[in-house]
Image (tube, helix red, strand yellow):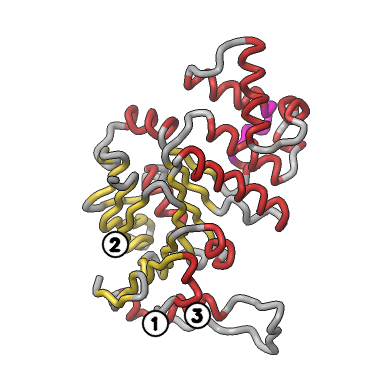
Amino acid sequence: MAPLLEVEDLRVTFRGERGEVPAVRGVSFSLGREKLGIVGESGSGKSTIGRAVLRLLPETASITARKVSFEGQDLLSLKPRALRALRGSRMTMVMQDPRFALNPVMRIGDQIAETLRVHGVGGRGRDLRNKVIQLLSAVQIRDPERVYRAYPHELSGGMGQRAMIAMMLISDPALLIADEPTSALDVTVRREVLAIMDRLVSERGTGLILISHDLNLVAGFCDRVLILYAGRVVEEIEASRLHDCRHPYSRGLLASLPLLDRPRDQLATLERDPAWLEGPVYRFGEEVRA
């Protein structure tokens, strides 16, 4: 089966007062109907990759690539109107904080209903309202009637994130990019939100990219993992074997994780080496030249 998404040699630079700053350096990967994790420190380029694929970066960003293909379509050559139609139907993104993604002056039900009307799948009147209630129930919101009438500020972080995911379900997307979707949630709610996204992949065949800084979360949730260092993929590995990674940076990230069963007297330091930007990378345990 052909990959859902193919990215080859993706490069992103930002223009500023001091010239161009590279943010993504020759990143390549493919995605099927699976869960792909992209991890790294803050500033490593994780979110930039997700936004570059959807072409949601500001005008100060320059994007080049040999290939960015989604369902056989070249995303970099699409006209704005065609891209917007694709982005609202087949590709979508869940942001980190729903407080900044939801309209603060509209009730949750009205926002979801508006999205349904845009896609022409909601009907009118009571039928439209019932469809919104069904979507809220599908993401395990216990009191969908109350949430339908609520404003974003009246919801907890977990409820807001579920409402965002409900809006994503409207178009039945083939690709979902989740940018740190659980970083602001407690452990219990995080598990519930991840279960919802896991069901999307297993029941609807959605391809999922999970952007995160949490190695343990990605190891337990994803199928494969890309580890980024300064905008470059230094290792690709099966998530179940993440603790067997070989690149020095990958091992440094793992060593810096706190362990409850083995408390340390000192925090581990994370060594860095500029040579990693040009040196070999590891793919599924094998050293390869970029």
Residue located at (43% from left, 42% from top):
175
Residue that carries the numbered disc 2 in the rendered image: 26
Earlier sequence position, callout 3 versus callout 1: 3
Residue that carries the numbered disc 1 in the rendered image: 273
Residue located at (60% from left, 34% from top):
166
Residue 8 is situated, as x and y percent measured from the top left of the image, at 26, 55
Left or right, 6 with reference to 108: left
Amino acid carrying mark 2 in the image: Gly
Amino acid carrying mark 1 in the image: Asp
Residue located at (71% from left, 51% from top):
189
Residue 23 is situated, as x and y percent measured from the top left of the image, at 38, 61
Q: Is residue 123 above or below residue 65?
A: above
- Whether pointer 2 and pointer 3 mark residues with C-beta atoms closer than 8 Å, the reply is no
Would you say residue 107 sits in the magenta stretch? yes
Circle 2 sits in a helix, a strand or a loop, which is it?
Answer: strand
Task: Please report the bounds of the magenta region as a residue range.
Answer: 101-108
Gap between marks 3 and 1 measured at Cα: 12 Å
Q: Nearer the viewer, mark 3 or mark 1?
A: 3
Residue that carries the numbered disc 3 in the rendered image: 252
